[in-house]
Amino acid sequence: MNEYKRISPSKRFLINIVLVIIFIVVGTLLTGGDSLSRASRALILQIGIYVILAVSLNIATGYLGQLPLGHAGFMAVGAYSAALFWKATLNMPTPVSIVLGLIIAGLIAAVFGIIIGIPALRLKGDYLAIITLGFGEIIRIAIINLSGITGGTPGLLNVPKYSSFLVVFLCVAATIAAIHFIMHSRHGRAILSIRENEIAADSCGVNLTYYKVLAFAMSAFFAGIAGALYAGFQGSLFPKSFDFMASINILVMVVLGGMGSMLGSVIAATVLTALPLVLQALAAYRMVIYSILLIIVMIFKPSGLLGRYDFSLPGLIEKWMNRKNKPGKEVANE
Amino acid sequence: MADTILKVEGINVYYGNIHAIKDVSFEVKEGEIVTLIGANGAGKSTVLKTISGMLRSKTGSIEFMGSSLMRMAPNNIVKNGIAHVPEGRRVFAHLTVEENLEMGAYTQPRSGIRDDMEQVFSRFERLRERRRQIAGTLSGGEQQMLAMGRGLMSRPKLMMLDEPSMGLAPILVDQIFEIIKELNDNGTTILLVEQNAQMALSIADRGYVLETGYITMSGTGEELASSDDIRKAYLGA
Ligand SMILES: Nc1ncnc2c1ncn2[C@@H]1O[C@H](COP(=O)(O)OP(=O)(O)O)[C@@H](O)[C@H]1O
Ligand SMILES: [Mg+2]
């Protein structure tokens, strides 16, 4: 049997970096000039934000195998943290304020992720879904009631609009890269093994407590960053943007794309964000369309459109390099 | 006299209000095969789970090679040299055979993994042929071998096997017990839980009988196998 040719990890990394740079340069040029309408520019940013939300929820849902229903809660925590920080640091150099705001948003959301992750150690399935749903609602109601700080129902206004194409898509690239690296490390294996079989993982010496909480904290961290970007994109925040339906929206993206597939989450987030905005006439029927899509996918492909397949350009190049070999029984992906 | 490697004294384990394990004490000496036999629901799996730290005892003590396991986290218990092969062939169904074995070496330094895997394959040739196969598609016997191989990857001093013969065809049961004896000959101490008392007692140095949470009898494998009570209750004679 022929040796399967592989691309070295450092070259893989290089290929991906080049891809990201090309994407960001082209995107910045496109969105900077007048070639795109305001609406399409806004749509592109929104897609970026939802991509981060979907891939971050995918950590808890796809990789750890839990079903949290309060992802918008973490997003809200990040959004308000960053917005308040940015409003308070207007005289700081803008890039510094942006970066610090993003990090703070992620970290505070991660703390909430840990608080939610701890009951998640004891609860599974429906119970965990209910507890996280409750968490999301508590956050929203707390924001309404802490109106002195958060602006309450009338909203938090005049948030600096820091979410440029560059900022949003650097965050998208960094999030995807970070999740990719973690999930392909020993730690990622540990998280996947818990999804596969908790008792077996335990008997292999995987620290269940640690990795469940870690997965929740990571999931919340990136949701917090997405929330910060959302704040810098909208320029104003209202509690109702973070209600239960917002969490469901994100969950639908993950489920449609395929739980455990990052590419699936990216595609589903893109399509589902773009659809209602592109086809304005359909906007009112969004939930109907979601439901029908979900039902169709669940009937024909219950594991989601891409199942657990993940895309990588280096992986495709490898396949092309090996195209002369007979397609063996080996399957490169999990 | 060999040293005692595992000493369990006066443990009591509860599931909520259910008192599953009642004042259980026993010991395993280095190099022995010790079996814990008993009917379904007697508490055998509960004892193993308590030793590996998945459940906790309210009383007593569990000592393994000089350190107490009562508060040790399950991952550290594995690191300390106890492998638990749980009941019901718990393999990672979507991972390949190799990836399952790698997970078994989770607590070990990466450098030794290739050699250890080679050793597992030399013991289970069937797994070598199927190294790239998804574990969920293996037969029951192969999955049991994989679960045992995965346990071996953590280089255990003591291997705890929970009903390895469950649901297997007689010819496979013979094979599995053959392998257990081989492992023991190569220096691994074995704590074997079985409902198949006859087979277990035939390879065991010593055995304990567990009934509704109590240890009711103990002795060498031969003594137990020839005891009238055991023959009536477990050997169908
Ligand atoms: N998770 C659980 N919750 C409540 N009771 C349990 C649980 N697991 C086992 N039991 C009870 O504890 C007793 C011992 O069970 P177990 O250790 O599994 O027995 P064995 O392995 O000998 O068949 C049984 O009465 C069983 O019903
Ligand atoms: Mg049992």
Image (cartoon, coloured by chain):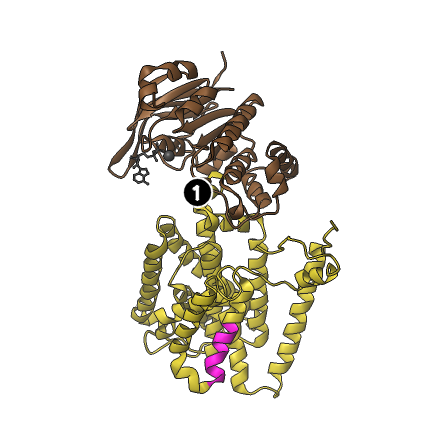
Packing grade of label 1 (10 A; few <14, some 14-19, many >=20) is: some
Q: Secondary structure at mark 1?
A: helix
Rendered residue at 40%/67% (across/down): A72
The residue lying at 32 percent from left, 76 percent from top is: A153
For the view shown, which residue lies furthest in the top direction?
A: B1
Which of the two residues, B142 or B63, is positioned nearer the viewer here?
Answer: B142
- Is residue B195 or residue B49 the one in the foreground? B195
Q: Position of residue A158 (x, y in %)?
A: 43, 79
Residue at screen point 60% across, 82% down: A31
- Residue with the mark numbered 1: A199
* Left or right, residue B79 beside residue A123: right
Q: Is residue A119 magenta?
A: no
**For this rendering, which residue is in front, A318 or A224?**
A318
Which percent across, then down, holds residue A123? 35, 51
Q: Nearer the viewer, residue A13 or A248?
A: A248
Q: Can you see residue A249?
A: yes
Q: Is residue A162 visible?
A: no
- Which region of the structure is painted magenta? A269-279
Toward the left, the furthest residue is: B17
Please say whether residue A275 is one of the residues in the magenta stretch: yes
The chain holding disc 1 is: A
The quarter of the picture where residue B98 lies is: top right
- Under mark 1, the amino acid is Ile
Residue B102 picture location, percent across and down: 58, 42
Q: In the figure, residue A37 lies in which quadrant?
A: bottom right
What type of secondary structure mainly makes up the magenta span? helix
The chain assigned the colour yellow in the figure is A
Quadrant in which the C terminus of chain B is drawn: top left
Q: Chain letter for brown, please.
A: B
How far across and down, in percent of the image, does residue B228 sit? 32, 15
Describe residue A283's horizontal placement relative to residue B188 as left or right: left
